[in-house]
Amino acid sequence: MSTTWTPSSEDYDRVFAEQNPWHKTGEVPMALAKETERHMAKFLSTRILDQSTRRYQLVLGPRRVGKTTVMYQVVRALLHRGVDRSRLWWLRLDHPLLVDWPLGDIVNQIMDLSNATAENPAFLFMDELVYTQRWDLWLKTFYDEQYPIKIIATSSASVALREGRLESGVGRWDERYLGPYVLSEYAELAGTSLPDFADASLTAALGKAFDPANRMVDLVNRRVELMFVGGFPEILLDSRDGTLEDITLNSQNVLRSDAVERAIYKDIPQSFNIESPLNLEKLLYVLAHQMTGIISPLNICRDLGFSQPTFDRYLSYLERAFLIFVLPNFAGNESATQRRGRKVYFVDGAVRNAALQRGIGPLDDPREQGLLLENMAAAHLQTLATVAGVRLHHWRSGSREVDLIYNHPTEPLAFEISNSPSHSRSGMEALLEEHPRFRGATYFVAPGASFVPASTSSSGIGSIPADVFLAVVGSQAAYALRQSFGVPG
């Protein structure tokens, strides 16, 4: 005779104790809160203690970028700043005992256990928020009814963009994007000192790169490692002593399992209630073959047997799970932009290689290395654009094209990315003919490219070495992140 097991209060107490070891020790285990911090950890700890704001903080981004580690580092920072350990509560919401327990009941019990008050609120760290039912309505309730709690939560799916939930979040929570490491951050991790190029705008930051006093050390090896291994903290830290072949294979194995398969077979089905994740994987595989190219929905639908609505929906799911991002064609006005061809990139080229199970093939393929370099440049700019609130596009008119358009409202920039310094400038010249506003703000980016400021070039087109460009964009992304948190500097 079978019986149904019902968890007891002791079972829940045990889960709370396991997930909150600092309640007993007063410290966060080093295995959970790594010593090396990403920039966001420092800003979040200051933000969550700020008495002038009640907004909850939602940290969104791909798997393996360190969202959970960042939250543990915030717990450690709060302990070191004197917050009583009994007020700091961790909830891993995909735990089997917590996933079906109403969030309101959990929070009410925590408030009782921590004696939370408006002057001494409880701090709730919710890992994988999307796994709890009606999470948005609960957060709205907690905020509107002024529960004495402060919340930092993570998700590997863009939960706040789901239908109806953006409205709930207005004024109640901030979305914080945490992407893979950019080149400047990886150089810092590896102990390499770089100039601080950051300025009030990307245009001004690029201007600093042409100052001989700001010349950098050679970052070719770091860029190659980042391109093949990916910007994922633990993988990068574990890859310091291996050969490029070994660390590339290890990265693909980890990302295939943790980033690709978990997103497709766990995160997306949980978030969007789909019944055919295998079709998602097929679409991702097709897009991986077309990385940096123009998407042809008609051909993809024909090949995969999708309807157009299914294709659009699945493409959106892959974007919201932070596997890919899609850039519309820049046309000078929004209605035309939305109607024309879209270009697909991966949040990190290493994720694309893992999806295709490419092995070490790209290491000896110049064409593929060119695609990965363009994807890296696009991903760096996408990280900056996301934090800074700027639209990113590509431009194509007939057979003429420019890879990336940073559509800042007052200081727009255009970039053509190539693996060869001898790449044609014809696409950039065509862009300037059709959109003169980019004259003096268009750059050719390639390894070994010369330093030519666009503003002083007779053609209106400048050039900059790829590694310098990536370092500048990374510095500016760090600056934009500080600005988004209201941190001076």
Image: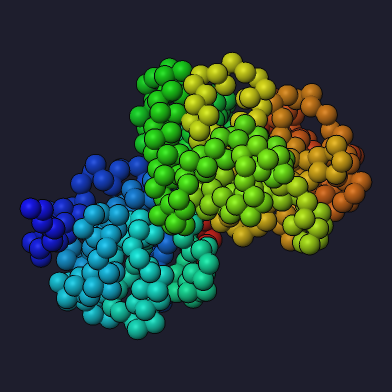
Quadrant in which residue 309 is drawn? bottom right
Please report the residue visible at 57 percent of the width from the left and 25 percent of the height from the top. 220
Query: Residue at point 28% right, 47% down?
Result: 33
Residue 484 image offset from top left, x and y in percent? 52, 62
Q: Residue at x 62, y 25 (%)?
A: 369
478 relative to 68 in the view: left or right: right
On the image, the x and y values in percent for residue 348 come to 53, 38
* Near-viewer residue (193 or 63): 63
Give residue 55's position: percent from left, percent from top: 42, 72
- Outermost residue to the right: 433
Foreground residue, 241 or 320? 320
Residue 293 against residue 318 in the figure, above or below = above
- Looking at the picture, does residue 52 appear above or below residue 399? below
Camera-side residue: 224 or 229? Answer: 229
Which quadrant of the view contains residue 134?
A: bottom left
The answer, for residue 170, to whether it is visible in the render is yes
Residue placed at 37% from the left, 21% from the top? 241
Q: Report the side of 245 relative to 433 (left or right).
A: left
Does residue 77 appear in this view?
Answer: no
Which colouring convention does the figure follow?
rainbow
Outermost residue to the bottom: 145
Q: Quick check: 54 left or right of 473?
A: left
Q: Residue 203's spot in the image, x, y percent? A: 71, 50
Q: Across the whole image, how many numbered discs are drawn on residues?
A: 0
> Residue 387 lies in what quarter of the image?
bottom right
Q: Is residue 347 above or below residue 220?
A: below
